[in-house]
Image (tube, rainbow, N blue to C red):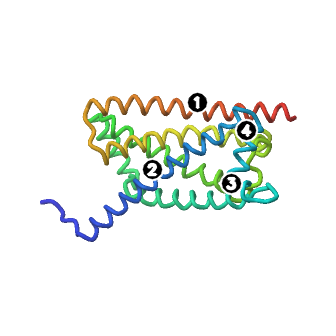
Amino acid sequence: MKARISPRLSRWSAKADLAQSLSGGLLALFLWVHLLLVSSILFGPEAMRFVARNMELAFLDPAGQGYPVVVSLMGLVVLVLVALHAAAALRKFPQNLRQWRALNRQMGQIPNPETRLWRWQVITGFVLFLLLPAHLWMMINQPETIGPEGSAARIWDQRMIWLYLPLLLAVELHAVVGVYRLVMKWCSVTPERRAWLVRLRSLLSLLFIGIGLASLLAFVRYAQLAN
């Protein structure tokens, strides 16, 4: 006999599911825009200074200095979205070792690529839970350092590259797989379209990770030339 789920609990679950999807989609969009803005360093320090000044709304400042607090506010908004997304997603995670073992047994008996993707979402989600707050705190607390000099010094001189490398890999994989799962969940996808989406997912993962790695190397080179 199946356990009955109360209408109230069902409505809460549906709202949490929608909140997870919306917050995840917004975070993925922000991440890709952020990555493209940061990659302006590939066109030289002046290009990134231009981007950083416009992010701080320098075009509204008569002195042309901008308002670094805008970056802090953006960081706070992202932090709230991350907290909302994590809270909505955690309800689906295995809660103890027994549940993890049961999941691994099921995956061994019934191999399913979608379940493996979900497990990668869990793993990368835990990595982001550990690493992402440190990056957001720096954005919120030191917005004036956003730019070629400050970013290069942070990445190379302060050795934050060892934070950004695993963060880059985890966040890009989590975002691309997450958007793929959103499309599969909320859209009507035929087997032919699913095969196309799988190829697109792999292509976007390689593209965004490649752009991120190239940007990190550009910051390292800029820091070394400055020293």
| Disc 2 residue type (three-letter) | Gly
Question: Rounded to the nearest whole Å, what is the CA distance between mark 2 and mark 1?
Answer: 21 Å
Q: Mark 2 near mark 1, Cβ–Cβ under 8 Å?
A: no
| Disc 1 residue type (three-letter) | Gly
For image coordinates 61% across by 54% down, the residue present is 133
Q: Mark 3 near mark 4, Cβ–Cβ under 8 Å?
A: no
Question: Rounded to the nearest whole Å, what is the CA distance between mark 4 and mark 1?
Answer: 20 Å
Sequence order check, earlier mark of 4 and 1: 4
Question: Rounded to the nearest whole Å, what is the CA distance between mark 3 and mark 2?
Answer: 21 Å
For image coordinates 60% across by 49% down, the residue present is 131
**Mark 2 residue element:** helix
Q: Mark 4 near mark 1, Cβ–Cβ under 8 Å?
A: no
| Disc 4 residue type (three-letter) | Ala
**Mark 1 residue element:** helix
In the rendered image, residue 4, in percent from the top left (x then y), is placed at 18, 65
Query: 189 and 125: which one is in front?
Result: 189
**Dot 3, crowdedness within 10 Å: few (<14), some or many (≥20)?**
many
Mark linked to residue 139: 3
Sequence order check, earlier mark of 2 and 4: 2
Query: Which residue matches tag 1?
Result: 210
Question: Rounded to the nearest whole Å, what is the CA distance between mark 2 and mark 4?
Answer: 28 Å
Sequence order check, earlier mark of 3 and 1: 3
- Above/below status of 188 relative to 90: above
Query: Which residue matches tag 2?
Result: 25
**Mark 4 residue element:** helix
Query: Which residue matches tag 4?
Result: 47
Question: Rounded to the nearest whole Å, what is the CA distance between mark 3 and mark 4?
Answer: 20 Å
Query: 147 and 106: which one is in front?
Result: 147
Q: Is residue 195 left or right of residue 214?
A: left
- Above/below status of 130 relative to 76: above
Q: Quadrant of residue 47?
A: top right
In the rendered image, residue 138, in percent from the top left (x then y), is placed at 70, 54
